[in-house]
Amino acid sequence: MPSYEEDLSEFERRNAQVLGISTDQVFTNEAWAKSMGGLSYPLLSDHWPHGHVSATYGVLRGDDGHPERAIFVIDRQGKVAYVDIHDIGEQPPTDKIMQALDKLK
């Protein structure tokens, strides 16, 4: 997620808001962001009820209660326009996210 810091101007140019979400508690998210040098976009907690948002989007892993690494592009009407789910150790490709955002215009 810190890699998206480098691309924030491209997200902004496309009028997109980057949000991070994890099932960790708020203070854990804040400590993690601080350890990364800070983030310029919101990092949200899906801790309670545990993983509710992740489960709603179908990305909560049942084996350990953590979400998959997933990207969702949601249009202005609230419709999911793009989904990219990767292995937790992989970084989703930014170019495909930008392409999805470009299609919303």
Image (cartoon, helix red, strand yellow):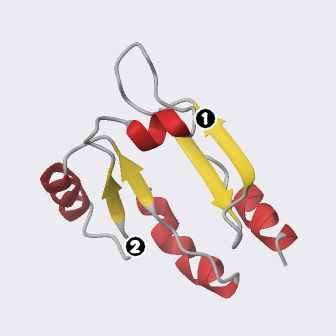
Quick one: SS at disc 2?
loop
Q: Quadrant of the C terminus?
A: bottom right
Q: Residue at x 82, y 71 (%)?
A: 104
Which residue, given by chain and number where applicable, does mark 2 sit on? 41
Q: Is residue 93 visible?
A: yes
Looking at the rendered structure, the kind of residue marked 2 is Tyr
Label 2 environment density (alpha carbons within 10 Å; few <14, some 14–19, many ≥20) = some
- Taking depth in this image into account, of 61 and 39 the one nearest to the observer is 61
Examine the rendered structure and indicate whether residue 15 appears above or below residue 24: below
Quick one: SS at disc 1?
strand
User: x%, y% of residue 41?
Assistant: 40, 73
User: x%, y% of residue 99?
Assistant: 81, 64
Examine the rendered structure and indicate whether residue 69 appears above or below residue 104: above
Which residue, given by chain and number where applicable, does mark 1 sit on? 86
- In the picture, measured across the screen, residue 30 lies left or right of residue 92, that is left
Looking at the rendered structure, the kind of residue marked 1 is His
- In the picture, measured across the screen, residue 81 lies left or right of residue 16, that is right
Q: Is residue 91 visible?
A: no
Q: Residue at x 71, y 67 (%)?
A: 75
Where is residue 87, by image quadrant? top right
Where is residue 7, by image quadrant? bottom right
Q: Quadrant of the N terminus?
A: bottom left
Q: How many marks?
A: 2
Q: Residue at x 74, y 60 (%)?
A: 95
Lower position in the chain sequence, tag 1 or tag 2: 2
Q: Which mark is residue 5?
A: none
Q: Residue at x 43, y 16 (%)?
A: 62
- Give the spatial CA distance, label 1 vs label 2: 21 Å
Query: Do tag 1 and tag 2 residues touch (Cβ < 8 Å)?
Result: no
User: x%, y% of residue 22?
Assistant: 35, 46
